[in-house]
Amino acid sequence: MGIKGYDVSDYQQSIPDDAQFVFVKVTEGRGHIQDNWRAKVKEARAQGCVIGYYHFGRSDVPPAQEFDNFRREVVKELRAGELLVYDFEPYNQDVSAATATTRKNEFLRLMKDAFPGHRCGMYTNVDWWTRTDDNHGDFLWIADYVEPGKPGIRARWMFHQYTEDPIDTNLYPGTLAELRAYAGGGTTGTTAAGGGTVLLPVNGYLAAAAWQPGDGERVTYGKLMNVRTRRMLQAAEAILGRKFRVTQGSFSTGVSASAGTHDGGGVLDLVPLGYDEVKALRRAGFAAWNRLKADGFPDEHIHAIAVGDPTMSPSAKDQVDSFFRGRNALRGQGPDNFRLREADRVLTGIHPDEPPPAAPTPEEDAEMFAPYEFTSGATTIPLEPSNGGAMKWGSLYFAFKVAEGDNNNKPVASVRIELQHDDGRWSLWKPNFEQTVDSPRWVAVLPDGYAALRFYTNVRCHGYVTGKSNA
């Protein structure tokens, strides 16, 4: 079981046709940049692959210098739901294993601090895994040229590189839908193929969705479930601000109407049902639907599946696949009955403890958008003024507060802005501009005829963006 992916560098000219995920080498050390890495990313996107970017580490170079090389390049392409990797193989680098480990950990920290909305992991081989500590960031990608899925380590891994003949080939031990769900754990929402809104786990709840040692242990939380499902349910309850009641738990084989979906782990039926309830469950990492009388359910409830649970039944896995295709996972495979309301389109993820700066104050006669509070990562803003009219063109205002100690203690953030066309395509508007805290207002005239704006920040920061229509 599992899906196949590849990792590519300058040695490979193209992406194999059967790739379902691809890791692209971007940089090495403090200054080397791979030729044509962006073309490989474009090719992988065209094939519908989950994409990761990796930096080949040099443990004889200060981590901050290495990371700056990687960061400057990767922000040119990085999108929500994509992975970041530090390649840890410090052969012939004239440093001790202890020094290499310290610098590896520092690079992982810098990477996660700069890109908290993305999964950041580590690649290494069995030899170096036995000589370093167990910190691999969010996930471990292990190289061991043995039978696929059976690397010679005890640690929990996510990707297994099992051969280099004729190209480095890797296994992910799950479905493409599960990998997309995991990779999208730092984002807040996407539109599924069938039109439903799939809310993926936001940053503050990544720990709830990640599989951890001991998660398969069975516990009772209203009904029987495993430890991970309980933790994810509690995360959903924290988002919602109130508790669910579990009407049917996991590992339950006595209900014929369930068609085997509850036979394994990760599956629950819950009440009460409703829009806010389903939204909270989806944000915590569940595939979840309201089951209504109109659908043939005399006792209305929410059906929820903890995405990525390796103990779920085959029929539950089919339902997760249906979820990511925008369907309702019922026999007729009708459309998902959940649509995210417009007011919830922009979700902000984690919020630092310190308060954000005050929203900027444009001229009194400006027609204002509601201010959007943001943290780091990607934030998407519909280009519509508050009265609901269409925006022809206008000005944009930013106010930032960079997290203390980040970006080498310099109060500056780099911002990249993209604009969305009416047909859904995104194009780059401003590649990178620097925004200082000392000058928190920045004004730009927006081009005409775009549906939404999306911006990325390269360091941990938060603040407001707001604007006016000049139509």
Image (cartoon, rainbow, N blue to C red):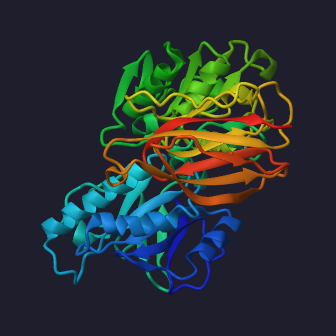
Q: Is residue 393 visible?
A: yes
271 to 288, vertically: above or below? above
80 to 256, vertically: above or below? below
Q: Position of residue 286 (x, y in %)?
A: 55, 33
Q: Position of residue 272 (x, y in %)?
A: 60, 12
Q: Position of residue 194 (x, y in %)?
A: 78, 43
Quadrant assignment for the C terminus: top right
Residue toward you, 334 or 403: 403
- Place residue 151 in its image quadrant: bottom left
In percent of the image, x 50 and y 23: which residue is there? 239
Q: Is residue 459 left or right of residue 426?
A: left
Q: Is residue 382 left or right of residue 50?
A: right
In percent of the image, x 62 and y 24: which residue is there? 278
- Place residue 220 in its image quadrant: top left
Residue toward you, 381 or 368: 368
Q: Where is residue 81 in the image (x, y as percent from the top left)?
A: 56, 51
- Place residue 466 in its image quadrant: top right
Q: Can residue 341 be seen in this view?
A: no
Image mark count: 0
Residue toward you, 401 or 48: 401
Residue toward you, 87 or 285: 87
Q: In this view, does 353 lie to the left or right of 239?
A: left
In percent of the image, x 79 and y 51: which residue is there? 447
